[in-house]
Image: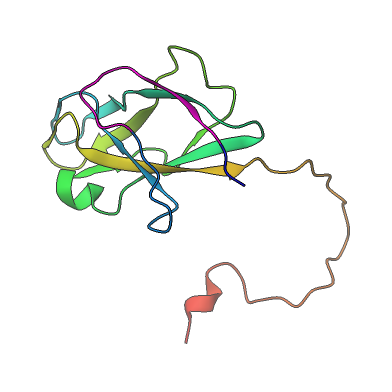
Amino acid sequence: MEKTIRIKYFTDKIEKLTYIDGKSDWIDLRASEDVTLKKGEFKLISLGVAMELPAGYEAHLVPRSSTFKNFGIIQTNSCGIIDGSYCGDEDMWRMPVYATRDAQIHVGDRICQFRIIENQPKITFDEVEHLGNENRGGFGSTGKQ
């Protein structure tokens, strides 16, 4: 079922967002400001948009696969979660980055991507003494030969 996202643009210097059906489940976002970073610096890079997500959804924001190679930046919180309540007129989306080398980012550079995910359903925890399942060998054990 198709969902609608209401979007506000803070600038006309970035391309309008589009969803290309069948190509990717992720939607690229662009820097809406020129940024110069020295190695070791942190910055919240403006993405030039605010959105009202569909009820019951959140957005996951991550770097594009080429972001580190092209710009030498990493997202500081690995995955940004934008919940549905972050939808005010001034709630511009930003990407928190750390520069691993001197970096130059220009308006319009595709630096990250997002997708929307349904919120986790309401859950309860049932405390037990034993789970009753077979052990897999411990955390990180599946990569051993």
Q: Is residue 145 above or below residue 114?
A: below
Picture coordinates of residue 68, whole percent (x, y)? 23, 49
Q: Is residue 78 left or right of residue 36?
A: right
Applied colour scheme: rainbow
Circle count: 0
Q: Residue at x 43, y 53 (%)?
A: 21
Q: Is residue 57 left or right of residue 143?
A: right
Q: Residue at x 19, y 42 (%)?
A: 100
Picture coordinates of residue 80, whole percent (x, y)? 45, 37
Q: Residue at x 88, y 61 (%)?
A: 129
The residue furthest bottom is 145
Q: Nearer the viewer, residue 48 or 120?
A: 48
Q: Nearer the viewer, residue 48 or 1?
A: 1
Q: Nearer the viewer, residue 61 or 48?
A: 48
Picture coordinates of residue 126, whole percent (x, y)? 87, 51
Let me know if residue 33 is in the magenta part. Answer: no
Quarter assignment of residue 120: top right
Q: Residue at x 54, y 34 (%)?
A: 4
Magenta span: chief secondary structure: loop
Residue range (magenta):
4-16
Q: Is residue 30 left or right of residue 55?
A: left
Picture coordinates of residue 3, whole percent (x, y)? 57, 39
